[in-house]
Amino acid sequence: MSEDRLQQECYLWFHNTYPKLRGLLFHVPNGGNRKGREARKFKVMGVFPGVADLLFIYKGRFFALELKVFGGSQSDNQKYWESIVTQNGVNYYLVWSLEEFKDLIKKILSNG
């Protein structure tokens, strides 16, 4: 399974399981390969390398979820972003499967 596919499955499960929380879990299209003018435009609009795949805001708390599949690892940019956001109180998680994602979301919601 690709990381993109894992992200799709996680997002769709959340979207369908928690319809009243729609809009609180989201993806910022921060990566990808852009060229020339578009890359410059996105950079001055705030693109920052390493931002987590999914961001979740719940009851005044902020969670960053970086999705990885077997054999994957964080890039240096992802490690740097993790360090700066955790120093500022963000809850950062590496998530390796749909089941792990489900368990994490249920834990977050039960501690709400």
Image (cartoon, rainbow, N blue to C red):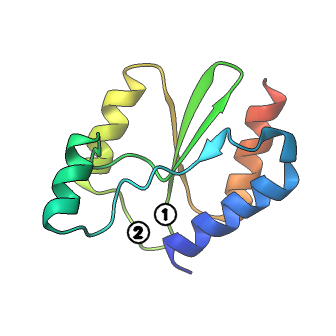
Tell me the number on the disc at residue 104.
none
Are discs 1 and 2 less than 8 Å apart at CB?
yes
Q: Residue at x 62, y 23 (%)?
A: 61
Q: Is residue 96 above or below residue 62?
A: below
3D distance between C-alphas at marks 1 and 2? 6 Å
Q: Could you tell whether 106 is left or right of 75 in the image? A: right
Report helix, strand or loop for mark 1.
loop
Q: Amino acid at mark 1?
A: Lys
The residue labelled by disc 1 is 68
Residue 10: percent from left, percent from top: 68, 61
Q: Residue at x 79, y 25 (%)?
A: 111
Q: Could you tell whether 22 is left or right of 62 in the image? A: right
Position of the C terminus, as image quadrant, is: top right
Residue 49: percent from left, percent from top: 27, 49
Q: Residue at x 50, y 70 (%)?
A: 3
The residue labelled by disc 2 is 72
Residue furthest to the left in view is: 36
Is residue 33 or residue 37 the one in the foreground? 37
Residue 35: percent from left, percent from top: 18, 69
Q: Amino acid at mark 2?
A: Gly
Q: Quadrant of residue 110?
A: top right
Is residue 73 or residue 32 the one in the foreground? 32
Q: Residues within 10 Å of mark 1 (few under 14, many from 20)?
A: many
Q: Could you tell whether 49 is left or right of 82 in the image? A: left
Q: Is residue 16 above or below residue 108?
A: below
